[in-house]
Image (cartoon, rainbow, N blue to C red):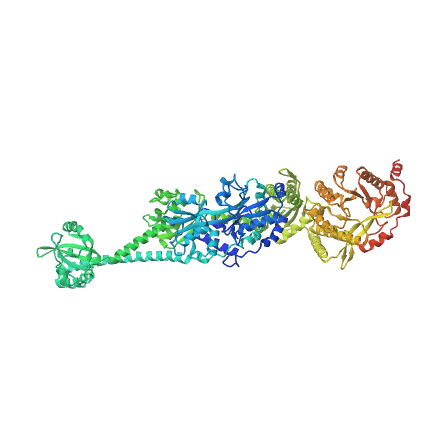
Amino acid sequence: MLRSANASASTYTFCPDGMRGRRTGWGAVLAATLALAMSAALAAPQILQLPDADWLAPLAASLAGRVAPDAGEQAWLAQGHAVRIRVADVPPYHFIERNQAQGIAVDYARLLCRTHHLSCRFVTGIPWVDALETLGQANGADLLLTIYPSAERRAQVAFTQVYLRAPWVIFTRENGPLVTQIADLDARRVAVEKGFAISDPLHRDWPGVHLEESNTTEQALERLATAQVDAYIGNLVTGIYLISNRGFDNLRIAAPTPLGYHEQAMGVRPDWQPLASLIDRTLNVMSEAEHGAIRQRWLARPDERLVNWRTFWWIITGISALAIGLLGSALLWNRRLRREIRERQRAETALRESDTRYRALFEAADDLIFVHPLASPESPARFIEVNEKICACLGYSRTELLQRSPLDLLAPEDLVEVPGEVETLLRERRLVFEKRLLTRSGERIPLEFHACLFELGGQTLVLSIARDIRERQRAEAALRDSHARFQSLFDHMNEGVALHELCFNAAGEAVNYILRGVNPAYETILGLPAEAVLNQTGDVAYATAEPPYLSLYARVALTGEAERFETYFPPLEKWFAISVAPWGARGFATLFTDITARQQQQRQLEQLAHYDALTGLPNRVLLADRLDMALAQTERDQQLLAVCYLDLDGFKAVNDRLGHEVGDQVLVEVARRLQETLRGADTVARLGGDEFVLLITGLDTVEDCAPALERLLRVLAQPYALGHERINLSASIGVALYPLDQGDPDSLLRHADQAMYAAKQSGRNIYHLFDADQDQRTRSHREALVEIREALERGEFRLYYQPKVDMRHGTVIGAEALIRWQHPQRGLLPPSVFLPLIDDHDLCCALGNWVLAEALRQMVEWQQQGLVLPVSVNIAAWHLQQAGFVERLRELLAAVPQLARGALSLEVLETATLADIELAGRVLRECRQLGVPVALDDFGTGYSSLTYFKRLPVDILKIDQSFVRDMLDDPEDLAIIAGVIGLTEAFQRQVIAEGVEKAEQGLLLMHLGCDLAQGYGIARPMPAVAIPDWTRHFCPEPLWATAGPPRVWRRQLSD
């Protein structure tokens, strides 16, 4: 994909990661082109016609719900600024078409404005040279869509993160010169855009390149297309877009560059830093798919013809084939030349021995042979004898040649050297030289002469044998050209190359090697200058005790079979791939490729594949291997293996309350404590979330694992100090022991997991050993959870309502909603059957939300029937403390605006609420702000204190039925009730008693000061349809009318 592997989730690079850095190759450019094609896989080669920006509305609405501005950003938004956004001619990022702002960056700007309800308008006509100077001024813009975030500009601009990135590449014409790197542009005209940062490194590192600045990318491409320049170095994305959409059909991508990337951020006026941070926050929240939705609308399908691979490889293949052919021809020619010289020598000897034999050979020779006296420009001498070959070569008859002097046939420019050559011939008696003879038509034919003196009839004569060397000269020229090309290729290769010659001892064994040649890349990559290694033996050149890899190199040189291997070079801390091939008779060539980056990437991939990215602990994959090894070792040693499944208690609440960043820090600290507490031979792995697996080996008895587990629990229970936060956590551990548990690895992990759940149900911060009975109970519990979830989906739950009354005034004041399960087979089930099964489970929240919604719906229905009856709903404390509870309650209340504030109230168990008094207090205060009163249920049965009661924002205390049931007979229960009622009066809270089953109980409660009650003695829970009729016919107990003032009676009781 186009998304960056590094840093920010909102930075997108229009090339693959392998193309990043100082050196990029053709494979990277091809990958970048393919990446652009993938991003617009179904698009036509032209830019899509954009509809109105309303297509951004769903994405903007989604982002608005996910982006949470901080206080500074909210304050800036509240000021209602109007944002002016500069648009220039920079396709496909931003430009004007059909009088509308268009482009990738424009769509990002529209999305940001819609998401945060900004007042935005696009402004044009601001030249780049004025854009920074006028930023934030009346005649300028407030936001620049694309700008390079240089350090020099930070005083003028508040930069966002880089969100657009594309590599710098070389563009040429289709039939232009072959260009594979910037160095190939030496002495050529190259277009670049004015003001771009790449001009500096081009001037510095390639001074021979003639740079010509253009105002825009399109102008530069136009100049290239019309042959005004030889190449253009620019942004890959903009170049491809303009080539595809402006008709530059003769332009192509020629090569990558080591210039890095064209990076673009947004630039905001410096006094609007909150806007820059808000843009970063929004870009970070966006997903890959959401970025792709914008990007793919603008990226056209790249033209495959932009990179002419076939031409490139035919050129390389042709040069190689020509060089090999010419080299072979030269070798054959040399062999032939030596052979023919020997034949000429034999012919001369035969000539002296036999005139007949001489004449036959003389005439049949393939070479030009002639005899003449010594001649000079002052005393020319005619030919005495010539053979047919010279006649045919020069186009003269034998008679014509015998009337001429050899000097008559020499090219005029060659006459100058004749006197010196005559002197040499007289002195040496033999001479080899080259001259050009003129044919009848005036053509100059180069010949190689082998001349010698001999005496005949008292006269000194010259015998000359000449050979036409036109083909040889052409071959030599081609060989020189081929050598130059190969030398250039050798010198400019990115890979380091070294040529070596083996050294042998008397026994014919290779004992060392000598470096005979290296290319510049070798010096750069290995850091070894040529003068330090040339003609040095391997041990000296590489500063080692023995020549490195001698046996391998010797095998390649002697067998002729190439080999390749990878090695680490400690002095440079680099990895190299070394290819070895035969060279010469007993030598070899090595090609060094730096693969350090690939090795690092491979190690990173191995790390990601086998280790947890957050904690560095083994992950599931590596845990499976470690578990198999531990099982095998346990069987060999006949010992026990403890497979421990560890889960943190209360971690989800920490994550929800303090955020995932703090949660991650806690997990890293937990991992550190686990590793420090266990032995090095044991394994600590993280499965994900707050779940860990421990493998404790080498146990002789079951009891041996107890000290380690207890030590782990103590260490993990110590407070976690993270910044200003002090966090208390504990852990629950489930243990399966092998081979007492004869399961396979998956079964052992599953059994340990089940034992961990048992530990949590037993009170947490403990460990639990797996047993089969517990396994059966766990399976039953999970099956019950599945059945409850399906019952909720099928709508099998019902709400029953138990009325609440004011005994003193004889009125119905409300009802408590009580859940029932209408089971299809077991009938109507009370909550005690199924609610305990979902404690601390997500189903608890789902079922609690259903009760809230159903109670509100029922109150609306009663109100439409003329019955206004408040309803209280029981909320589990675990549900109350989950993130999003208040927000969900707010949504439910907003859906029933016809209900008055206070119509719905919450009843929370005291003991559970006080598990986290700070969080509970904060949530209850937010509920009261929504107009929802709060009652503390079962008051007096938990671990309350006056301090906690004072800090909890509750409106009502509910006396538990366990005290009311025996209050007539048990003085202690009666004293507790009186104390609770007195507590509510002291703190000015309401009080209600539940479980009133007798009129006498109600009378006594009224005497104590508690007038509100509910219970079977008043009314049993009933379906919603029965409530209206019951309220109309409700009659209070006559006994209650006899109740006196509560304070007087309480004084009598105390007396």
- Direction from residue 383 to residue 720 in the image, left or right: right
What x and y, as percent, mark residue 375?
A: 13, 54
Q: Which of 329 and 482 is in front in this view?
A: 482
Q: Quadrant of residue 195?
A: top left
Picture quarter with the C terminus? top right
- Direction from residue 781 to residue 397 in the image, left or right: left
What x and y, as percent, mark residue 1026?
A: 83, 55
| Residue at the outermost left position | 458
What residue is rendered at 45% in x and 53% in y? 27
- Direction from residue 811 to residue 375 in the image, left or right: left
What x and y, as percent, mark residue 881?
A: 70, 45
Taking the image as drawn, is residue 501 in sight? yes
Is 532 situated above or below 782?
Answer: above
Q: Which of 614 and 85 is in front in this view?
A: 85
What x and y, as percent, mark residue 235?
A: 47, 50
Q: Which of 654 and 836 is in front in this view?
A: 654
Taking the image as drawn, is residue 615 in sight? no
What residue is rendered at 28% in x and 56% in y? 475
The mark total stands at 0
